[in-house]
């Protein structure tokens, strides 16, 4: 059985008070019987406190990034062992904003992925094509290349430790959402490629979630697709009511 997963990527938003308020409101609104895996990802300075506020709830705390090196002279960076020491055990890797603005190549992302899996972290790994790729009908090629250069280079993965997030770059923060059929088409393609590389059992059990302008009124149509196992939510995750509505749309 594949896990249903909804994660809120808060990106560089919210100060301490806003982060705490948002967690408080999500907790109040969340249905206790929900069996979806729910993640939030506040910024680094607030992770420690967020973990404490989420203790005893269904909400897990996800780091937005991690450095590919173990430790040392990397000013401004955060390591896996630092995250581990405050109780974080899941991390987001390969977001298109990191790829684009911070020049994170597939090689760097592979290192982050490999180290994180070795340390027992659950990894949310993002892939997705740009608008140009889509216009030029290159989306399948781009997705396949991203998979081959990163996830497929890992020898052995436990499916519970990997969640693939399909995030078409043209749909992130733009208000443009991939149609449910477009999302399904790519998710099925990813699952087929995963099956070829890691086997049917692995591919049937791995969660593949969609991200890109998911809103409360568009979530249920996307989540109804057979290969869409949940969502990675940006803007709408900053509002407790919208986020919980999305969680409840699965
Ligand atoms: P939006 O939902 O704001 O488009 O962001 C999606 C995203 O980048 C999640 O990681």
Image (cartoon, grey):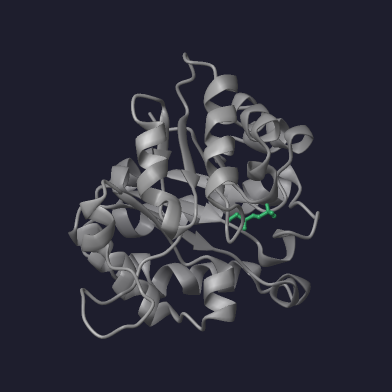
Q: Which residue is pictured at 51% across the width and 53% down the height?
A: 165
* Along the line of sight, the residue nearer the viewer: 62 or 210: 62
Q: Is residue 115 at least partly visible in the picture? A: yes
Q: Which residue is pictured at 59% across the width and 37% down the height?
A: 22
Q: Quadrant of the C terminus?
A: top right
Above or below for 24 versus 73: above
Outermost residue to the front? 17
* Residue 108 in the figure: left or right of residue 212: left
Q: Quadrant of the N terminus?
A: top left
Above or below for 121 versus 222: below
* Residue 80 in the figure: left or right of residue 101: left
Outermost residue to the top? 33
Q: How many marks?
A: 0
Residue 104 in picture, x, y percent from top left: 47, 80
* Residue 59 in the figure: left or right of residue 179: left
Q: Quadrant of residue 123?
A: bottom left
* Along the line of sight, the residue nearer the viewer: 212 or 194: 212
* Residue 26 in the figure: left or right of residue 84: right
* Along the line of sight, the residue nearer the viewer: 33 or 240: 240
Q: Which residue is pictured at 53% across the width and 76% down the height?
A: 99
Above or below for 31 versus 169: above
Q: Ligand 1 appears in which quadrant?
A: bottom right
Q: Is residue 203 at least partly visible in the picture? A: no
Residue 183 in picture, x, y percent from top left: 66, 49
Residue 12 in picture, x, y percent from top left: 58, 61
Residue 46 in picture, x, y percent from top left: 44, 51
């Amino acid at each position: 059985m594949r896990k249903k997963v909804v994660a809120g990527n808060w990106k560089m938003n919210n100060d301490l008070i806003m982060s705490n308020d948002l967690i408080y409101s999500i907790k109040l609104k969340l249905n206790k019987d929900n069996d979806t895996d729910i993640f939030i990802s506040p910024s680094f300075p607030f992770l420690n406190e967020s973990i404490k506020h989420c203790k005893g709830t269904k909400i897990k705390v996800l780091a937005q990034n991690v450095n590919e090196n173990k430790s040392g002279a990397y000013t401004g960076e955060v390591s896996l062992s630092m995250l581990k020491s405050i109780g974080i055990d899941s991390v987001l890797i390969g977001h298109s904003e990191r790829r684009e603005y911070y020049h994170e190549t597939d090689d760097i992302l592979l290192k982050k992925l490999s180290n994180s899996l070795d340390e027992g972290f659950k990894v949310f790994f993002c892939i997705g094509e740009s608008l140009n790729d889509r216009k030029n009908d290159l989306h399948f090629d781009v997705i396949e290349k991203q998979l081959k250069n990163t996830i497929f280079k890992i020898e052995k993965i436990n499916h519970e430790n990997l969640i693939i997030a399909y995030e078409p770059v043209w749909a992130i923060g733009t208000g443009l959402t991939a149609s449910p059929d477009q999302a399904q088409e790519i998710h099925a393609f990813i699952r087929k490629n995963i099956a070829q590389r890691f086997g049917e059992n692995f591919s049937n059990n791995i969660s593949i979630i969609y991200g890109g302008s998911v809103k409360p009124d568009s979530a249920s149509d996307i989540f109804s697709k057979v290969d869409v196992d949940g969502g990675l939510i940006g803007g709408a995750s900053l509002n407790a009511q919208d986020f919980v509505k999305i969680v409840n749309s699965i």
